[in-house]
Image (cartoon, rainbow, N blue to C red):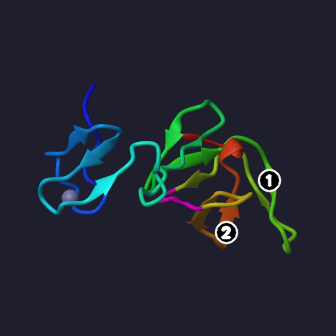
């Protein structure tokens, strides 16, 4: 089992000292249970359960009504360069002809 990198300086030379982890590079000590100063990586999945990442290209899997507009985002519309955000609509993107909008990851699939 490998130890996590130091959350302060990202050194890989961490070692265990009792229940604590210690970094010899910056002398930071922390508890492996306490991940409060480590940014938690949130995972976003598309309709097929594939993990999405910033910059991915996805396609819309069903017709979606666009809020505040009479147009519909058609199934199969390609959305390039998505940005994942926290929230109910967890994809920030720009779509040709629509502009900036937010989508739910469950209504797209990775291409
Ligand atoms: Zn360190």
- Identify the mark nearer the N-term, 1 or 2: 1
- Is residue 14 toward the left or the right of residue 19 in the image? left
Above or below, comparing residue 47 to residue 98 in the picture: above
Q: Is residue 106 above or below residue 25?
A: above
Residue positioned 29% across, 42% down in the render: 4
Q: Is residue 83 magenta?
A: yes
**Is 93 left, or right, of 57 in this rendering?**
right
Q: How many angstroms separate mark 1 from mark 2 (CA)?
A: 12 Å
Q: Which mark is residue 64?
A: 1
Residue 101: mark:
2
Magenta highlight on residue 20: no
Of residue 80 and residue 104, the one placed in the foreground of this image is 104
Residue 81, x across and y down, in percent: 46, 59
Asked whether, in this view, residue 39 is left or right of residue 48, the answer is left
Quarter of the image for residue 87 reads: bottom right
Q: Is residue 6 above or below residue 47?
A: below
Closer-to-camera residue (107/12) = 12
Q: Main secondary structure of the magenta part?
A: loop
Question: Which residues are the magenta region?
Answer: 80-85
Foreground pick, 49 / 18: 18
Instruction: Rate crowding at label 1 as few (under 14), some (14 to 19) or many (20 or more) other CA atoms within 10 Å.
Output: some
Mark 1 element type: strand
Residue 19: which disc?
none
- Badge 2: few (under 14), some or many (20 or more) residues near its Cα, within 10 Å? few
């Amino acid at each position: 089992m490998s130890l996590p990198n130091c959350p302060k300086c990202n050194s890989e030379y961490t070692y265990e000292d009792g229940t604590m982890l210690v970094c010899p590079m910056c002398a930071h000590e922390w508890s492996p249970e306490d991940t409060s100063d480590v940014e938690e990586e949130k995972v976003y999945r598309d309709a097929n359960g594939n993990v999405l990442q910033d910059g991915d290209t996805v396609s819309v899997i069903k017709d979606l009504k666009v809020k505040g507009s009479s147009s519909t985002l058609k199934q199969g519309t390609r959305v390039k360069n998505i940005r994942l955000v926290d929230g109910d609509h967890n994809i920030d993107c720009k779509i040709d002809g629509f502009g900036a909008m937010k989508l739910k990851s469950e209504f797209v699939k990775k291409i």
